[in-house]
Structure formats: structure tokens, C-alpha cells
Amino acid sequence: MIYSIEISEISLQELDETVEYISETLQNETAAENLYNEFYKKAHSLITNPMRYALVRNKYLASKGIRLMTVNNYNLFYVVREDVNIVRIIRFMHSRRNWVNLLKESEETITTEVLI
């Protein structure tokens, strides 16, 4: 089964800010480009088998169907809507951030914007 991919507005913003930080502040354009490409490569890989990554370990967030995939030192969070064959990427952040609280805070404000 093939799934469509939706990327939330906040995920795109987080990706853009991270790439900009790596490129401009750390002055490593190669690493920034690699992260950007890896994000889309991994996101695209969810089209065919989105269930291969586990639910997050937090019971509340797992009950919402939130799954976790790593992209280098970053976490890509997503949910799978099997009823309509859609994978929705909801957040993208550094693995050392307090992602449990950030996901709980943003749960109701996540909107989708882009299909890939």
C-alpha cells in the first residue's frame, strides 16, 4: 500500500531554521544540505512502510499514534492515518530537546501544508 506524505507547517519551519543555523551560524553548508536531503529522503521512505518505526515511549503520545524516526541527530515525529493512507509529519527537532513537552504543547496546533 502506498501512503501520501503531509508535512506540517511547524515541521517545515523547524527544518528551515535548523538548516539555516547549520549553514550560517556553524558555517557548514555541506552538513546543512546533507540534513535537508536526508530529511526528505527519510520522509519519502515512509510512503511504502510507515509502520516500521516504533511508537514513542511516552504512553500518552503513543496513544495518539505518534511515531519516531531519527534523521542524523534529529527526531522526526509522525502519525499514520491508515483510514486515508496518509503519513503526517508533525514535528522535527534536535534529539536533545524536551520533545515530550513540546509535542504535548503543540498537539492541537499542528497543521499540514505540503504534500511530497
Image: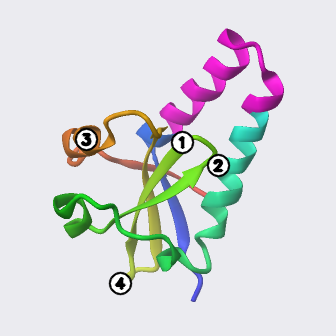
Front one among 31 and 85: 31
Question: Which comes before the other along the chain, label 1 or label 2?
Answer: 2
Question: Which comes before the other along the chain, label 2 or label 4?
Answer: 2
> Would residue 18 be counted in the magenta stretch?
yes
Pair 3/1: label in front? 1
Dot label at residue 10: none
- Residue 45 horizontal side relative to residue 14, left or right: right
Q: Which residues are magenta?
A: 12-32
- Residue 102 horizontal side relative to residue 87, left or right: left
Query: Which of the 4 image quarters holds residue 101?
Result: top left
Q: Which residue is mark 4?
A: 83
Dot label at residue 106: 3
Q: Amino acid at mark 1?
A: Tyr
| Cβ–Cβ under 8 Å for marks 3 and 1 | no
Residue drawn at 49 percent across, 33 percent down? 14
Pair 1/2: label in front? 1
Distance between the Cα atoms at labels 1 and 2?
A: 9 Å
